[in-house]
C-alpha cells in the first residue's frame, strides 16, 4: 500500500481507467523523483477543474480556493510515496472529495442557516454569468436561475452531489466515480439516477418558464 | 436508463446514439425521459465557476514552504485534520483515556509492592517477592517431612 494512497483514504485505489497510459501519472512519477517543473505542469493543468469542483461542492469561492490549495499541498506532500495505481485524476479527485466532505462536515451547522450560497460571492456570481443578456432584467433573471441550480445541487445528499459533479462537469467514467466514492459502479449508477431524478423535479419549472 | 443518461450527456458512440434516438422517437417514456434530462443538463450548464484567482499558485507555494518548515507535531495535526482515518480519532482518544485511567487506577492500588532495601547491599527486594520465597521454603520443608 502506498503512502500516497494511505494519506487519502486508508486503502489502495485499484486500477481503473487506463492508469498505465496516464500521462499525468507519468508526470507525477517525475515529481516523485524530484522534478518540480512537472508538479507545476500538473498544477496548472488541473487547478481550474479542482477549484471548480470544490466551488460547486462547498458553494463558496474563497473556501474552494483554500481547499484547492490544500488538495495540491497534499499531492505535493504525498509525492515521495506516489505509485501509479489509478488514473491521476481519479486519485486527485479522491483527495479533493475527502477535503470537501471534511470541510462540509466541519461547516454543516454554520451552513444550515445560509444554504442559499454565500452572499459575499456576489462578485463571483456576476462573473460566472456569461454576458449574453444585454438588459439588467435578463441578467437578474439569469442570476436567479443560477441560484436555483446551485440550490438544487447544494441540497442533494453529499455523495449524490459528488457523483453528479463528477459525471456532469468533470466527465468522469462510472468506474472513476466509484473509485472516488469507494463504492460499486452499480451504486454510482443508482446514485446518479436518483440525483438526476431529484434535479429534474427541482428544476422542472425552469424549463416550463421558457426563459432560456 | 444508463444509456439514456449517457445519450443526454453526449457520451454514447454515434452508432448507439443514433439507434437510441430512433427508438426514443417511437417510445413515449424514453422520449419524456430524454427531454426532461436534457433540460436538467442545460440548466446545469448555466453554472460556470469563475476562474481561479491569480494568486492561487503563489499562495500554494507559500503554504508548501510553510508546511516543509512546520514541526512534526503540526504535520501530524494536519494529517489528523484531513486524514481518512479521522473518524477513528475519537475512538482512539476514548481508548487512550481508558488506558490512562486503567494505569492510574492500578498504579494507586499497589501499596503492597513496597520496596525494602536490604541494608548495605544496595539491592531492592519487594515485599511480595520475600513472601513468595518464604512460602516456597515452607513448601520445600513440608515435602521433606513427607518424605
Image: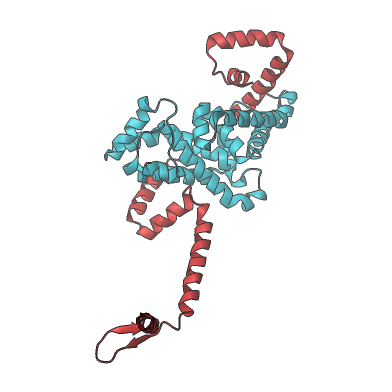
Measured from the top left, where is residue B6 in percent x and y?
58, 20
Which of the two residues, A116 or B147, is positioned nearer the viewer here? B147
Left or right of A20, for residue B3: right
Q: Quadrant of residue A207?
A: top right
What residue is at 50 percent from the left and 28 percent from the top?
Answer: A175
The image shows residue A212, relative to residue B105, as above or below, that is above
Q: Quadrant of residue B141?
A: bottom left
- Quadrant of the frame with the N terminus of chain A: top left
What residue is at 36 percent from the left and 48 percent from the top?
Answer: B64
Tell me, yes or no, if residue A98 can be seen here. Answer: yes
Measured from the top left, where is residue B97 in percent x and y?
51, 66
Left or right of B109, for residue B44: right
What residue is at 40 percent from the left and 58 percent from the top?
Answer: B74
Q: Quadrant of residue A73?
A: top left
Tell me, yes or no, if residue B52 can be seen here. Answer: no
The image shows residue B65, relative to residue A204, as above or below, that is below
Q: In this structure image, what is the colour of chain B?
A: red
Q: In this structure image, what is the colour of chain A?
A: cyan
- Quadrant of the frame with the C terminus of chain A: top right
Which residue is outermost to the bottom?
B119
The image shows residue B94, relative to residue B5, as above or below, that is below
Measured from the top left, where is residue A33 in percent x and y?
27, 39
Left or right of A203, for residue A5: left
Amino acid at each position: 500500500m502506498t503512502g500516497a494512497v494511505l494519506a487519502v483514504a486508508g486503502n489502495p485505489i485499484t486500477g481503473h481507467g487506463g492508469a498505465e497510459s496516464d500521462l499525468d501519472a507519468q508526470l507525477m512519477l517525475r515529481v516523485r523523483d524530484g522534478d518540480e517543473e512537472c508538479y507545476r505542469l500538473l498544477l496548472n493543468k488541473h487547478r481550474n477543474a479542482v477549484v471548480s469542483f470544490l466551488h460547486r461542492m462547498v458553494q463558496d469561492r474563497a473556501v474552494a480556493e483554500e481547499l484547492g490549495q490544500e488538495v495540491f499541498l497534499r499531492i505535493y506532500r504525498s509525492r515521495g510515496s506516489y505509485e501509479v495505481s489509478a488514473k491521476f485524476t481519479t486519485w486527485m479527485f479522491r483527495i479533493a472529495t475527502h477535503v470537501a466532505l471534511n470541510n462540509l462536515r466541519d461547516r454543516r451547522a454554520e451552513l444550515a442557516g445560509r444554504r442559499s450560497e454565500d452572499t459575499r460571492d456576489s462578485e463571483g456570481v456576476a462573473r460566472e454569468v456569461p454576458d449574453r443578456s444585454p438588459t439588467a432584467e435578463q441578467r437578474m433573471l439569469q442570476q436567479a436561475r443560477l441560484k436555483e441550480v446551485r440550490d438544487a445541487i447544494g441540497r442533494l445528499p453529499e455523495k449524490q452531489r459528488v457523483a453528479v459533479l463528477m459525471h456532469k462537469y468533470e466527465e468522469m467514467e462510472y468506474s472513476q466515480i466509484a473509485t472516488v466514492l469507494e463504492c460499486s459502479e452499480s451504486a454510482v449508477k443508482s446514485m446518479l439516477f436518483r440525483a438526476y431524478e431529484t434535479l429534474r423535479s427541482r428544476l422542472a419549472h425552469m424549463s416550463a418558464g421558457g426563459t432560456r | 436508463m444508463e444509456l439514456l443518461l449517457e445519450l443526454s450527456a453526449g457520451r454514447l458512440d454515434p452508432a448507439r446514439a443514433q439507434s437510441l434516438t430512433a427508438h426514443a422517437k417511437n417510445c413515449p417514456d424514453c422520449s419524456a425521459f430524454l427531454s426532461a434530462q436534457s433540460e436538467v443538463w442545460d440548466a446545469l450548464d448555466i453554472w460556470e465557476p469563475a476562474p481561479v484567482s491569480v494568486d492561487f499558485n503563489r499562495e500554494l507555494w507559500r503554504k508548501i514552504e510553510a508546511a516543509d518548515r512546520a514541526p512534526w507535531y503540526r504535520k501530524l495535526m494536519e494529517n489528523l485534520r484531513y486524514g481518512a482515518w479521522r473518524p477513528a480519532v475519537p475512538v482512539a482518544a476514548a481508548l487512550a483515556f481508558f488506558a490512562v485511567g486503567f494505569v492510574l487506577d492500578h498504579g494507586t492500588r499497589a501499596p503492597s509492592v513496597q520496596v525494602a532495601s536490604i541494608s548495605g547491599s544496595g539491592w531492592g527486594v519487594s515485599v511480595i517477592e520475600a513472601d513468595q520465597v518464604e512460602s516456597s521454603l515452607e513448601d520445600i520443608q513440608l515435602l521433606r517431612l513427607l518424605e
